[in-house]
Image (cartoon, rainbow, N blue to C red):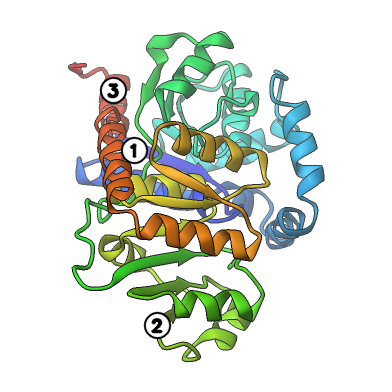
């Protein structure tokens, strides 16, 4: 069976989930192609669109949150979906795909419109945050892959048939497995996300460096200025720029401080790595953080530097609390079926699937 995964690079979460899905499906013998649909449909404008999105998240989060709240329960066609159906038809013809897996709500909306107009293709929507926002819900969707039982219940409350919803967790690469924390110093991993969002004051890093018996690794992402400012400056802080070895840094850590992006959250769960999450501002990250904290897998830290340092110290020096968070992650991981997408594809292909 030929499978087309449609996504977009608004941040790297959607793309990372798509690559993880491709990895799983190819391992089962399926032919898979992952396409940035926005780049395919408008190659000249897509880079500008992504830059505008990055600016909006960084400087216009209030407007983004307002739109997110106002549309939380709004159903209807996705804007521009009709205009992009022709591009989808071209792509389906080029790839010969039987099944489309979408990791972005706009892509799901375009495929849903295509099916509404008579197109024949199966649609699997993989929701890449712990959310049941209506932007993800489209008639014609055959199956939803969701992060948690709470999301499943939320979709059911909005009219989605329960038998079409699989709790898979958010897909992450198979390299993210339960780690073995360092047996030496307490190991703290700090991630700034794909945009390199980190505290700015030097005082924060100096006080972090002074914490006894703690080694810190900071992944600055693509924030080259921050990398140059911090690299080699502190005895107990290792600074790493953009890397593809995040799984290895997670495997050796006792605790991770990060913003709660959907992919990062589920990479941590797969690694059984307790989290300290910066109090989030964006709505979908608030939902992700709520999921973590309510399940006992994480604690919150404000972005006020002294409070954040206090939260780091109180958590890292609390072995009982860390063990409880790791146990909660184990329980959460056990409720998810990471192979759900392969089972769903086989089901759509007419093969028998054992639940």
**Which corner quadrant of the image does residue 70 belong to?**
top right
Q: Earlier in the sequence, mark 1 or mark 2?
A: 1
| Disc with the residue nearer the chain's start (3 vs 2) | 2
Quarter containing the N terminus: top left
Instruction: Give the number of the mark in front: 1 or 2.
Output: 2
53 over 288 or under it: above or below: below
Query: What is the distance, in whole Å, between disc 1 and disc 2 at their CAs?
Result: 49 Å
Image marks 1 and 3: residues in contact by CB distance under 8 Å: no
Q: Nearer the viewer, residue 29 or 336?
A: 336
Residue 235 vs residue 14: left or right? left
Asked whether residue 281 is in view, the answer is yes
Residue at position x 22%, y 51% in the image: 178
Quarter location, residue 49: bottom right
Q: CA distance from mark 1 to mark 3?
A: 11 Å
Pair 3/2: label in front? 2
| Residue 55 image offset from top left, x and y in percent | 75, 60
Q: Residue 110, image x and y in percent?
A: 62, 31
Image mark for residue 349: 3
Above or below for 121 versus 354:
below
Does dot 2 land on a helix, a strand or a loop? loop
Query: Going 62% across and 69% down the picture, which residue do you hit?
Result: 199
Q: Which mark is residue 236?
A: 2
The picture places residue 351, in percent across and down from the top left corner, at 21, 19
Task: Report x, y in % for residue 185.
Answer: 27, 73
Label at residue 2: 1
Q: Secondary structure at mark 3?
A: loop
Assign a secondary structure to mark 1: strand
Identify the image quadrant of residue 71: top right
Asked if residue 241 can be seen in this view, the reply is: no
Between 16 and 250, the one nearer to me in the picture: 250
Residue sitting at x 30%, y 30% = 336
The disc, 1 or 3, on the residue closer to the chain's N-terminal end is: 1
């Amino acid at each position: 069976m030929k499978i087309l995964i449609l996504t977009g690079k608004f941040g790297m979460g959607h793309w990372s989930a798509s690559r993880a899905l491709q990895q799983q499906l190819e391992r089962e013998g399926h032919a898979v192609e992952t396409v940035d649909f926005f780049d395919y449909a408008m190659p000249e404008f897509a880079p500008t669109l992504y830059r505008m999105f990055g600016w909006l998240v960084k400087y216009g989060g209030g407007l983004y949150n307002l739109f997110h709240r106002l549309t939380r329960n709004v159903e209807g066609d996705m804007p521009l979906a009709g205009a992009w159906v022709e591009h989808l038809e071209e792509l389906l013809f080029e790839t010969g795909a039987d099944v489309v897996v979408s990791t972005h709500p706009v892509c799901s909306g375009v495929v849903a419109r295509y099916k509404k107009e008579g197109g024949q293709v199966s649609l699997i929507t993989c929701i890449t945050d712990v959310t049941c926002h209506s932007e993800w819900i489209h008639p014609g969707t055959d199956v939803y892959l969701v992060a948690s039982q709470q999301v499943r219940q939320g979709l059911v409350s909005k009219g989605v048939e329960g038998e079409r919803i699989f709790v898979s967790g958010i897909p992450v690469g198979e390299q993210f497995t339960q780690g073995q924390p360092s047996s030496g110093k307490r190991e703290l991993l700090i991630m700034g996300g794909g945009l390199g969002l980190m505290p700015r004051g030097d005082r924060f890093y100096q006080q972090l460096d002074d914490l006894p018996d703690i080694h810190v690794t900071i992944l600055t992402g693509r924030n080259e200025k921050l990398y140059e400012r911090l690299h080699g400056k502190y005895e107990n802080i290792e600074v790493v720029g953009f890397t593809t070895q995040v799984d290895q840094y997670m495997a050796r850590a006792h605790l991770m401080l990060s913003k709660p992006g959907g992919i990062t959250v589920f990479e941590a769960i797969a690694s059984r790595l307790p989290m300290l999450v910066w109090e989030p501002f964006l709505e979908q990250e608030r939902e992700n953080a709520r999921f973590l904290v309510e399940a006992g897998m994480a604690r919150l830290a404000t972005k006020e530097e002294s409070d954040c340092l206090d939260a780091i110290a109180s958590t890292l020096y609390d072995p009982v609390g860390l063990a409880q968070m790791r146990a909660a992650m184990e329980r959460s991981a056990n409720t998810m079926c990471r192979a759900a997408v392969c089972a769903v594809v086989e089901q759509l292909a007419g093969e028998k699937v054992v639940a």
